[in-house]
Image: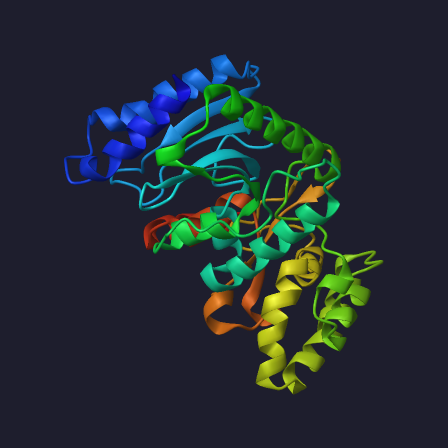
Amino acid sequence: MLSELIVKFATNYLAATSTPFAGNREADVIRYELPELIRKLAAIPLNYKVYGSVGQGQWAEVPWFAILDKDITTSTQKGYYVVFLFSADMKYVYPSLGVGWQQFEEEYGVREGRIAIEQVVRELQRILRSPLDDFSFAKRDLKATSILGKGYESGGVCHKVYEIEKMPSDEVIVNDVRNLMGVYRELKGLVGKNVLNLEIPEEQIADEEFNRKVIEESEDVASPEVAKEKIKALTKIIETAPAQERTKMARYVARNRKFAELVKQAANYTCQICGMPPFKTKSGELYAEAHHTLELATHRIDHPDIMICVCAQCHRVITYGSEAEISKREDMGRQN
Protein backbone atom coordinates (compact mmCIF):
# COMPACT_ATOMS: atom_id res chain seq x y z
CA MET A 1 0.00 0.00 0.00
CA LEU A 2 2.76 2.49 0.95
CA SER A 3 4.92 1.54 -2.01
CA GLU A 4 1.96 1.81 -4.37
CA LEU A 5 0.98 5.24 -3.04
CA ILE A 6 4.52 6.59 -3.51
CA VAL A 7 4.58 5.29 -7.08
CA LYS A 8 1.15 6.76 -7.80
CA PHE A 9 2.19 10.18 -6.50
CA ALA A 10 5.46 10.23 -8.46
CA THR A 11 3.73 9.06 -11.64
CA ASN A 12 1.06 11.77 -11.50
CA TYR A 13 3.02 14.70 -10.08
CA LEU A 14 4.58 16.27 -13.18
CA ALA A 15 1.23 16.31 -14.96
CA ALA A 16 -0.36 17.86 -11.86
CA THR A 17 2.12 20.76 -11.92
CA SER A 18 0.53 22.01 -15.16
CA THR A 19 -2.85 22.33 -13.42
CA PRO A 20 -4.02 24.87 -10.78
CA PHE A 21 -2.21 24.51 -7.45
CA ALA A 22 -5.09 25.23 -5.09
CA GLY A 23 -7.25 22.25 -4.13
CA ASN A 24 -5.32 19.75 -6.21
CA ARG A 25 -5.75 16.08 -5.32
CA GLU A 26 -2.06 15.24 -5.69
CA ALA A 27 -1.16 17.76 -3.00
CA ASP A 28 -3.42 15.90 -0.55
CA VAL A 29 -1.61 12.63 -1.23
CA ILE A 30 1.72 13.90 0.06
CA ARG A 31 0.35 16.31 2.65
CA TYR A 32 -1.96 13.85 4.36
CA GLU A 33 -2.18 10.30 2.96
CA LEU A 34 1.51 9.40 2.83
CA PRO A 35 2.31 10.95 6.26
CA GLU A 36 -0.65 9.21 7.91
CA LEU A 37 0.26 5.87 6.35
CA ILE A 38 3.96 6.04 7.25
CA ARG A 39 3.09 7.01 10.84
CA LYS A 40 0.78 4.01 11.12
CA LEU A 41 3.04 1.42 9.49
CA ALA A 42 6.24 2.52 11.25
CA ALA A 43 4.45 3.14 14.56
CA ILE A 44 5.84 6.67 14.83
CA PRO A 45 5.07 8.23 18.25
CA LEU A 46 3.02 11.42 18.61
CA ASN A 47 6.03 13.45 19.73
CA TYR A 48 7.11 13.35 16.08
CA LYS A 49 5.51 15.58 13.45
CA VAL A 50 4.87 13.84 10.13
CA TYR A 51 3.86 15.95 7.15
CA GLY A 52 4.56 16.59 3.49
CA SER A 53 4.69 19.44 1.01
CA VAL A 54 4.36 20.15 -2.70
CA GLY A 55 5.20 23.83 -2.25
CA GLN A 56 3.62 26.96 -0.85
CA GLY A 57 1.39 28.73 -3.35
CA GLN A 58 3.11 27.07 -6.30
CA TRP A 59 4.32 23.60 -7.19
CA ALA A 60 7.65 22.55 -5.69
CA GLU A 61 10.48 21.30 -7.86
CA VAL A 62 11.30 18.73 -5.17
CA PRO A 63 8.26 17.55 -3.15
CA TRP A 64 8.80 15.66 0.10
CA PHE A 65 7.30 14.18 3.25
CA ALA A 66 9.21 14.24 6.52
CA ILE A 67 9.37 12.98 10.11
CA LEU A 68 10.42 15.62 12.65
CA ASP A 69 11.25 15.25 16.33
CA LYS A 70 9.26 18.16 17.80
CA ASP A 71 11.95 18.68 20.42
CA ILE A 72 14.40 19.49 17.61
CA THR A 73 12.21 21.24 15.05
CA THR A 74 8.65 21.52 13.76
CA SER A 75 9.69 22.83 10.34
CA THR A 76 11.94 21.41 7.64
CA GLN A 77 13.50 24.86 7.35
CA LYS A 78 15.32 24.33 10.65
CA GLY A 79 17.19 21.59 12.50
CA TYR A 80 17.46 18.09 11.01
CA TYR A 81 14.99 15.29 10.36
CA VAL A 82 14.07 12.13 8.42
CA VAL A 83 12.75 12.99 4.96
CA PHE A 84 11.67 11.34 1.71
CA LEU A 85 12.76 13.62 -1.16
CA PHE A 86 11.50 13.09 -4.71
CA SER A 87 13.89 13.92 -7.54
CA ALA A 88 12.78 16.72 -9.84
CA ASP A 89 12.24 14.28 -12.72
CA MET A 90 10.10 12.04 -10.44
CA LYS A 91 12.18 8.97 -11.27
CA TYR A 92 13.62 8.49 -7.79
CA VAL A 93 12.78 9.01 -4.14
CA TYR A 94 15.44 9.34 -1.44
CA PRO A 95 14.66 8.23 2.14
CA SER A 96 17.21 10.32 4.02
CA LEU A 97 18.41 12.00 7.15
CA GLY A 98 18.58 15.64 6.15
CA VAL A 99 19.59 19.02 7.54
CA GLY A 100 17.29 22.01 6.98
CA TRP A 101 18.64 24.30 4.23
CA GLN A 102 16.79 27.57 4.91
CA GLN A 103 18.47 28.13 8.28
CA PHE A 104 21.85 28.28 6.51
CA GLU A 105 20.56 30.46 3.68
CA GLU A 106 19.15 32.95 6.19
CA GLU A 107 22.32 33.00 8.26
CA TYR A 108 24.97 33.07 5.52
CA GLY A 109 23.32 33.68 2.15
CA VAL A 110 23.21 31.14 -0.67
CA ARG A 111 26.88 30.77 -1.54
CA GLU A 112 28.33 30.70 1.96
CA GLY A 113 25.30 28.77 3.19
CA ARG A 114 26.11 25.86 0.91
CA ILE A 115 29.67 25.78 2.21
CA ALA A 116 28.42 25.87 5.80
CA ILE A 117 25.74 23.18 5.45
CA GLU A 118 28.11 20.81 3.66
CA GLN A 119 30.67 21.23 6.42
CA VAL A 120 28.01 20.49 9.06
CA VAL A 121 26.90 17.41 7.10
CA ARG A 122 30.47 16.11 6.99
CA GLU A 123 30.82 16.59 10.74
CA LEU A 124 27.55 14.75 11.43
CA GLN A 125 28.69 11.89 9.20
CA ARG A 126 32.02 11.77 11.04
CA ILE A 127 30.53 11.44 14.53
CA LEU A 128 27.86 8.86 13.70
CA ARG A 129 28.43 5.49 15.35
CA SER A 130 25.51 3.53 13.89
CA PRO A 131 26.40 0.85 11.32
CA LEU A 132 25.00 2.23 8.06
CA ASP A 133 26.64 -0.03 5.51
CA ASP A 134 23.54 -0.09 3.32
CA PHE A 135 23.10 3.72 3.33
CA SER A 136 25.03 6.16 1.16
CA PHE A 137 26.92 9.22 2.44
CA ALA A 138 27.37 10.67 -1.05
CA LYS A 139 25.61 13.85 -2.11
CA ARG A 140 22.06 13.25 -3.32
CA ASP A 141 21.38 14.07 -6.98
CA LEU A 142 17.84 15.41 -7.02
CA LYS A 143 18.16 16.84 -10.56
CA ALA A 144 17.33 20.18 -8.95
CA THR A 145 17.87 23.61 -10.52
CA SER A 146 16.31 25.88 -7.86
CA ILE A 147 18.15 27.32 -4.86
CA LEU A 148 15.92 25.34 -2.51
CA GLY A 149 16.38 22.10 -4.44
CA LYS A 150 20.15 22.56 -4.50
CA GLY A 151 19.99 23.21 -0.76
CA TYR A 152 18.23 19.88 -0.27
CA GLU A 153 21.02 18.19 -2.23
CA SER A 154 23.67 19.70 0.04
CA GLY A 155 21.87 18.82 3.28
CA GLY A 156 21.90 15.02 3.11
CA VAL A 157 23.63 13.16 5.94
CA CYS A 158 22.80 9.64 4.72
CA HIS A 159 20.27 8.17 2.33
CA LYS A 160 19.06 5.33 0.17
CA VAL A 161 17.66 5.71 -3.29
CA TYR A 162 14.52 3.98 -4.60
CA GLU A 163 13.85 3.86 -8.31
CA ILE A 164 10.16 4.61 -8.81
CA GLU A 165 9.84 1.89 -11.45
CA LYS A 166 11.40 -0.63 -9.04
CA MET A 167 10.01 0.39 -5.68
CA PRO A 168 10.76 -1.92 -2.75
CA SER A 169 8.03 -3.48 -0.64
CA ASP A 170 6.30 -1.77 2.27
CA GLU A 171 8.31 -3.94 4.63
CA VAL A 172 11.64 -2.70 3.23
CA ILE A 173 10.52 0.95 3.29
CA VAL A 174 9.29 0.73 6.89
CA ASN A 175 12.52 -0.97 7.96
CA ASP A 176 14.56 1.81 6.34
CA VAL A 177 12.44 4.41 8.13
CA ARG A 178 13.08 2.72 11.47
CA ASN A 179 16.82 2.61 10.77
CA LEU A 180 16.81 6.31 9.91
CA MET A 181 14.86 7.06 13.07
CA GLY A 182 17.55 5.28 15.06
CA VAL A 183 20.25 7.45 13.48
CA TYR A 184 18.06 10.51 14.14
CA ARG A 185 17.86 9.66 17.85
CA GLU A 186 21.60 9.02 17.97
CA LEU A 187 22.42 12.42 16.50
CA LYS A 188 20.06 14.11 18.92
CA GLY A 189 22.03 12.61 21.78
CA LEU A 190 25.35 13.62 20.22
CA VAL A 191 24.71 17.17 19.02
CA GLY A 192 21.43 18.29 20.58
CA LYS A 193 18.91 20.44 18.77
CA ASN A 194 20.79 23.15 16.92
CA VAL A 195 23.14 22.15 14.09
CA LEU A 196 23.52 25.78 13.02
CA ASN A 197 25.75 26.31 16.06
CA LEU A 198 27.57 23.01 15.69
CA GLU A 199 31.22 23.34 16.68
CA ILE A 200 33.36 22.13 13.79
CA PRO A 201 36.82 20.81 14.78
CA GLU A 202 39.47 23.37 13.98
CA GLU A 203 41.42 20.97 11.78
CA GLN A 204 38.47 20.86 9.37
CA ILE A 205 38.62 24.62 8.84
CA ALA A 206 41.27 26.40 6.77
CA ASP A 207 44.33 26.96 8.92
CA GLU A 208 44.38 30.76 8.81
CA GLU A 209 46.24 32.97 11.25
CA PHE A 210 43.35 35.41 11.51
CA ASN A 211 40.87 32.64 12.21
CA ARG A 212 43.02 31.35 15.05
CA LYS A 213 43.38 34.88 16.39
CA VAL A 214 39.60 35.41 16.47
CA ILE A 215 39.09 32.20 18.40
CA GLU A 216 41.76 33.16 20.90
CA GLU A 217 40.42 36.68 21.37
CA SER A 218 36.84 35.51 21.82
CA GLU A 219 37.76 33.48 24.90
CA ASP A 220 37.70 34.81 28.48
CA VAL A 221 35.62 37.91 27.75
CA ALA A 222 34.65 39.19 31.18
CA SER A 223 32.78 42.39 30.25
CA PRO A 224 31.51 44.51 27.33
CA GLU A 225 34.58 46.72 27.74
CA VAL A 226 36.94 43.76 27.29
CA ALA A 227 34.98 42.65 24.20
CA LYS A 228 35.30 46.15 22.70
CA GLU A 229 39.08 46.14 23.23
CA LYS A 230 39.39 42.75 21.56
CA ILE A 231 37.32 43.99 18.60
CA LYS A 232 39.68 46.98 18.23
CA ALA A 233 42.66 44.65 18.05
CA LEU A 234 41.00 42.44 15.45
CA THR A 235 39.87 45.48 13.44
CA LYS A 236 43.48 46.55 12.99
CA ILE A 237 44.25 43.16 11.45
CA ILE A 238 41.21 43.38 9.15
CA GLU A 239 42.12 46.85 7.88
CA THR A 240 45.61 45.74 6.87
CA ALA A 241 44.56 42.37 5.40
CA PRO A 242 44.38 41.94 1.60
CA ALA A 243 40.98 41.39 0.02
CA GLN A 244 41.55 37.67 -0.43
CA GLU A 245 41.96 37.18 3.31
CA ARG A 246 38.74 39.09 3.96
CA THR A 247 36.98 36.68 1.63
CA LYS A 248 38.26 33.77 3.67
CA MET A 249 37.16 35.50 6.84
CA ALA A 250 33.59 35.66 5.64
CA ARG A 251 33.74 31.99 4.69
CA TYR A 252 35.20 30.64 7.89
CA VAL A 253 35.06 33.11 10.76
CA ALA A 254 31.33 33.82 10.41
CA ARG A 255 30.68 30.10 10.30
CA ASN A 256 32.53 29.62 13.59
CA ARG A 257 30.37 32.42 15.07
CA LYS A 258 33.19 33.58 17.37
CA PHE A 259 33.47 37.05 15.86
CA ALA A 260 29.71 37.62 16.12
CA GLU A 261 29.85 36.60 19.75
CA LEU A 262 32.30 39.40 20.49
CA VAL A 263 29.95 41.94 18.92
CA LYS A 264 27.10 40.70 21.13
CA GLN A 265 29.27 40.77 24.22
CA ALA A 266 30.36 44.33 23.44
CA ALA A 267 26.69 45.40 23.36
CA ASN A 268 25.98 43.49 26.57
CA TYR A 269 23.53 41.42 24.49
CA THR A 270 21.17 44.43 24.27
CA CYS A 271 19.37 45.04 20.97
CA GLN A 272 20.88 48.02 19.14
CA ILE A 273 17.65 48.57 17.21
CA CYS A 274 14.83 48.50 19.79
CA GLY A 275 16.89 48.59 22.98
CA MET A 276 15.37 45.43 24.45
CA PRO A 277 17.53 43.48 26.92
CA PRO A 278 18.32 39.82 26.15
CA PHE A 279 16.35 36.88 27.46
CA LYS A 280 17.85 33.83 29.09
CA THR A 281 17.85 30.46 27.36
CA LYS A 282 16.94 27.20 29.07
CA SER A 283 20.63 26.75 29.88
CA GLY A 284 20.74 30.16 31.56
CA GLU A 285 22.75 31.93 28.84
CA LEU A 286 21.90 35.39 27.48
CA TYR A 287 20.46 35.27 23.98
CA ALA A 288 20.91 37.82 21.19
CA GLU A 289 21.83 37.69 17.51
CA ALA A 290 24.43 39.41 15.34
CA HIS A 291 23.26 41.12 12.15
CA HIS A 292 25.44 42.15 9.19
CA THR A 293 24.22 45.52 7.92
CA LEU A 294 25.90 44.66 4.62
CA GLU A 295 24.99 41.20 3.35
CA LEU A 296 27.85 38.86 4.16
CA ALA A 297 27.42 36.62 1.11
CA THR A 298 27.48 39.62 -1.27
CA HIS A 299 30.20 41.81 0.26
CA ARG A 300 32.26 38.92 1.68
CA ILE A 301 33.69 40.82 4.63
CA ASP A 302 33.18 40.24 8.34
CA HIS A 303 33.91 43.54 10.10
CA PRO A 304 32.56 45.00 13.39
CA ASP A 305 31.70 48.25 11.60
CA ILE A 306 28.97 46.41 9.69
CA MET A 307 27.74 44.19 12.53
CA ILE A 308 25.24 45.01 15.26
CA CYS A 309 23.67 43.13 18.16
CA VAL A 310 19.92 42.62 17.74
CA CYS A 311 17.09 40.73 19.36
CA ALA A 312 15.47 37.86 17.43
CA GLN A 313 12.38 39.94 16.60
CA CYS A 314 14.33 42.87 15.20
CA HIS A 315 16.56 40.51 13.22
CA ARG A 316 13.53 39.15 11.38
CA VAL A 317 12.00 42.61 10.90
CA ILE A 318 15.14 44.15 9.38
CA THR A 319 15.59 41.07 7.18
CA TYR A 320 12.03 40.66 5.93
CA GLY A 321 10.03 43.68 7.13
CA SER A 322 9.00 46.85 5.33
CA GLU A 323 10.63 50.23 5.95
CA ALA A 324 7.62 51.19 8.08
CA GLU A 325 8.07 48.14 10.30
CA ILE A 326 11.78 48.85 10.70
CA SER A 327 11.00 52.44 11.68
CA LYS A 328 8.63 51.19 14.39
CA ARG A 329 11.42 49.11 15.91
CA GLU A 330 13.81 52.06 15.76
CA ASP A 331 11.22 54.29 17.48
CA MET A 332 11.05 51.72 20.28
CA GLY A 333 14.82 52.04 20.68
CA ARG A 334 14.64 55.80 20.96
CA GLN A 335 11.99 55.49 23.66
CA ASN A 336 13.92 52.91 25.70
199 left or right of 41 in image: right
Q: Residue at x 22, y 24 (%)?
A: 25
For this rendering, which residue is in front, 310 or 87?
Answer: 87
Q: Is residue 266 above or below residue 46?
A: below
The residue at the far front in this view is 166
Q: Is residue 221 above or below residue 95?
A: below
In percent of width and height, residue 243 lies at 57, 84
Can residue 134 be seen in this snapshot? yes
In percent of width and height, residue 142 lies at 41, 48
In percent of width and height, residue 174 lies at 53, 22
For this rendering, which residue is in front, 38 or 161?
Answer: 161
In percent of width and height, residue 3 lies at 40, 23
Residue 24, quarter of picture: top left
For this rendering, which residue is in front, 6 or 85?
Answer: 6
Q: Is residue 271 above or below residue 49?
A: below
Q: How many marks?
A: 0
Can residue 326 be seen in this snapshot? no
Q: Residue at x 63, y 72 (%)?
A: 249
Q: What colour-coding does the image apply?
A: rainbow
Q: Is residue 264 above or below residue 96?
A: below
The residue at the far left in this view is 19
Where is the N terminus found, in terms of image quarters? top left
